[in-house]
Amino acid sequence: MKITFIGAARTVTGSCFLVDTGKRRILVDCGMHQGHDAEEVNRRPFPFDPSEIDCLFLTHSHLDHVGLVPRLVMDGFRGRIITTAAAADIAELILYDSAHIQESDTEWYNRKALRSGLPPKMPLYMRRDVDKVLPLLDRKSYGVIETLGDDIRFRFVDAGHILGSSTLELWCRDGQAEKKFVFSGDIGKKDNPIVHDPVFVAETDYLTIESTYGNRLHKGIKESIDELVSVIRGTFRQGGNVIIPSFALGRTQDLLFILNKLVKEDRLFRINVYIDSPLAEGITRVYMAHQDYFDEEARALFNIESRDALRIRFTKSSEESMELNKIKREAIIIASSGMCDGGRVRHHLKHNLWRKECSIVFVGYQAAGTLGRKIVDGARAVDVLGERVAVKAGIHTLGGFSAHADRDELLNWISMFSDTPEIFIVHGEEQVSLEFKTLIDGRFHYKTHVPVSGETFEV
């Protein structure tokens, strides 16, 4: 058997791993690359024949785990796409939104290219290509061992990251021998809002584990909530707005839950929250349709239809989004994308980033090369929508809102294995993954690797 690391190898995005049993070829995730040179990387041919892939497992539905699935189907994949029911419903929204962005951005580029005498380009994929993905989705439940023929068994367990997120257990038989692979997906931290805590796995031969925060600790969620309250109150006293770049999936729903709770606890009073993302609204509806995935507190408190505590407005059209730019004070605007490289948040940064009375609150990971990373790293001015904008607003990074496990939580998750798995460290910036390897080596003395993109291991 062989395992090849195609994406998320010494980088955070583009999750994609290929298991070749000799009889079957199985893909785990097929994500889009984000950050520096992302468009070029996403347009490269797959380093395998998609028509030869028997099935695709999706650990969850963030774009960096599912974003290239339409391309996979365009290039000949016809197998099953196996994931949880909630992840499948969310993936449908994520992929249609991604296709819409591809079409819109390409149309804008081609208008400029025509004027400049440059050749036009095609979108990475279109909405009609997403149509062909949906019939292939195969929805599964947590905790049930299923089979693919007589040589493959698999099970999803709750990764505690976002709604429907999973760790994948995969048993592959080659003749009389059976080997077990575990793909962590993105592991959530304990006490994430809404979803249950991550489930530990007891044993495996080979473990592929994420390392997004493998060299650092998060602030506690209580400390981050206290800081959020302080930022909102202080910004409103100064006469400014609070802009929160947020992923439409996961983080936006967590923020609504937390803000709603803060108002009910009288720590904030009747605040106005604008969700400037049609995708976020759609995903929030999916969350409400899958309350069986919620933890007990979320079931009791998170009701997006309730207006008794929180004044929430979802903006649908671009005209409604532009109207928000007329609001100069006492608004919380949550908009995607979470790393500021696309979406409507760029317009709100253009109108608020230069205002010293405003605050920009980052509540998620900012990959190297993204606009969000440049702001977090202290840039005094940045390019936003073709315009140079000064960074004078207050910049706040609230690590406690991360949906990822931190260094100690990842190490604790590994410690629950009763055997001695061979470990492949992925989904982290190169230096972070290498530092995480050193920690694992020192504590567990397992055989560990930090694969490079395209590297294959015989197992």
Image: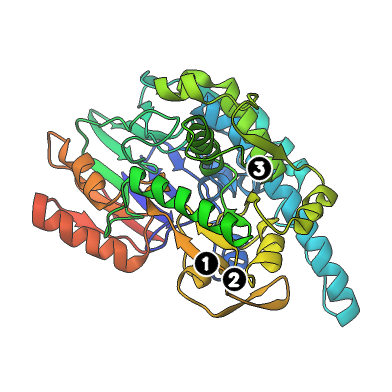
Task: Tell which residue pokes out farthest to the front in this image.
Answer: 237
The quadrant in which the N terminus is found is top left
Q: CA distance from mark 2 to mark 1?
A: 7 Å
Q: Give the secondary structure at mark 1.
A: strand
Q: Earlier in the sequence, mark 1 or mark 3?
A: 3
Q: Nearer the viewer, residue 144 or 270?
A: 270
x and y percent of residue 90 in the render?
59, 34
The residue that disc 3 covers is 272
Question: Label 1, label 3: how many angstroms apart (C-alpha)?
Answer: 20 Å
Q: Is residue 131 above or below residue 381?
A: above
Tell me the kind of residue under disc 1.
Gly
- Residue at x 28% of width, y 58% of height: 216
Q: Position of residue 286 (x, y in %)?
A: 61, 28
Residue underneath mark 2: 356
Q: Position of residue 4 (x, y in %)?
A: 38, 53
The residue carrying mark 1 is 394
Side (left or right) of 150 relative to 177: right
Which is nearer the N-term, disc 2 or disc 1? 2
Q: Are marks 2 and 1 in contact (CB under 8 Å)?
A: yes
Local crowd size for mark 2, using a 10 Å CA cut-off: few (<14), some (14–19), many (≥20): some
Say what amino acid the circle numbered 3 marks: Asn
